[in-house]
């Protein structure tokens, strides 16, 4: 649900603190990516990949685009 709030522009970013497998968020990541968002794993300093990685924190956010 929080991924959808971010995708709809109702939130700039949402941290997800509950342990989860990155691959379990695939559908939500696709929805967010379709509007220019990204899911990152701050503890690893990278974009979250669809792996069997158990992570304690994912951050889903909209990517700010420079239109100048």
Image: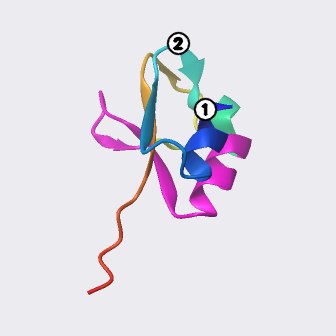
Q: Position of residue 42 (x, y in %)?
A: 31, 33
In this rendering, position of residue 8 left or right of residue 44: right
23 and 34: which one is in front?
Answer: 34
Q: Which of the two labelled residues, at mark 1 and mark 2, occupies the earlier sequence position?
A: 1
Q: Quadrant of the C terminus?
A: bottom left
Furthest toward the bottom, the residue is 68
Furthest toward the top, the residue is 18
| Residue in view at x 53 percent, y 13 percent | 19
Q: Which mark is residue 18?
A: 2
Q: Position of residue 3 (x, y in %)?
A: 61, 39
Compared to 57, does 3 lie above or below? below
Q: Position of residue 62 (x, y in %)?
A: 45, 53
Residue position for label 1: 2
Compared to 17, does 36 lie above or below? below
Q: Is residue 32 magenta?
A: yes
| Residue in view at x 68 percent, y 30 percent | 24
């Amino acid at each position: 649900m929080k991924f959808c709030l971010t995708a709809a522009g109702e939130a700039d970013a949402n941290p997800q603190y509950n342990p989860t497998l990155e691959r379990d968020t695939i559908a939500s990541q696709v929805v967010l990516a379709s509007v220019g968002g990204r899911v990152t794993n701050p503890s690893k300093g990278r974009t979250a990949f669809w792996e069997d990685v158990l992570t304690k924190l994912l951050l889903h956010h909209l990517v700010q685009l420079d239109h100048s």
